[in-house]
């Protein structure tokens, strides 16, 4: 494997070599998603697209574990999530990170996995047709 060493990444055009869109490499490394996934949480859980996610574990209705292919440096990463429900009965539901203890998932947020759930304010959970999770660090 080759290594490319550089201090800046820049966009140029052949017509004019303007250096108007450049950034330090550390911005690319530190500002990029370390993992992301779009998955179907209904029936047999399936990853549609993803990066640095090895699998999704179905822990029960509306309860999923995102397993990372390469571990994070620590568990102090930022998580962004969204969900799409195609069922009108689930109109008040939302995606969230599981906090506290759970009988089915012992570790909610670690360097190797993240537990996410889809449910309502009254702790009713639903399988979700489209879950989106992004990990930034």
Image (spheres, helix red, strand yellow):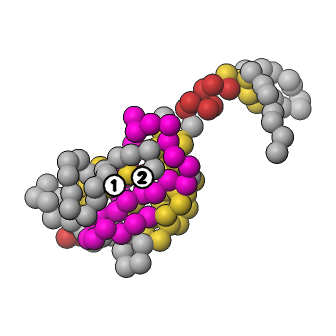
Residue beneath label 2, please?
113
Q: CA distance from mark 2 to mark 1?
A: 7 Å
In-front residue for pair 38/51: 51
**Residue drawn at x 61%, y 32% as measured from the top left:** 29
Vertical order, 25 against 76 (above or below): above
Depth order, front residue of 96/77: 77
* Residue tagged 1: 115
Main secondary-structure element of the magenta-colored stretch: strand
Q: Are marks 2 and 1 in contact (CB under 8 Å)?
A: yes
Task: Tell me the number on the disc at residue 95.
Answer: none
Element carrying mark 2: strand
Which residue appears at 32% of the width and 55% of the height?
Answer: 116
Instruction: Give the x, y percent position of residue 85.
Output: 32, 65
Q: Which residue is located at x 38 percent, y 51 percent?
A: 114
Crowding at mark 2 (Cα within 10 Å: few <14, some 14-19, many 20+): many
Magenta extent: 56-85
Quadrant position of residue 122: bottom left
- Was residue 70 drawn as part of the magenta stretch in this picture? yes
Instruction: Say how many tags the image has.
Output: 2
Question: 52 above or below 88?
Answer: above
Q: Residue at x 50, y 37 (%)?
A: 73
Question: In the image, residue 45 lies at what x, y percent?
Answer: 42, 72
Residue 93 vs residue 3, the one in the foreground: 3
The correct choice, above or below, for 5 with respect to 97 in the image is above
């Amino acid at each position: 494997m080759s290594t490319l060493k550089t201090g800046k990444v820049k966009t140029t055009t052949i017509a004019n070599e303007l250096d108007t869109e450049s950034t330090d490499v550390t911005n690319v490394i530190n500002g990029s998603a370390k993992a992301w996934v779009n998955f179907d949480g209904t029936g047999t859980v399936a990853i549609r697209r993803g990066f640095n996610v090895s699998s999704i574990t179905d822990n029960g209705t509306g309860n999923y574990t995102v397993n990372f292919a390469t571990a994070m440096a620590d568990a102090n990463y930022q998580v962004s999530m969204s969900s799409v429900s195609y069922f009108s009965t689930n109109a008040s539901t939302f995606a969230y990170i599981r906090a506290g203890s759970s009988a089915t998932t012992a570790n909610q947020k670690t360097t190797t996995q993240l537990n996410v759930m889809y449910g309502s304010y009254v702790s009713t959970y639903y399988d979700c047709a489209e879950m989106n999770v992004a990990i930034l660090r």
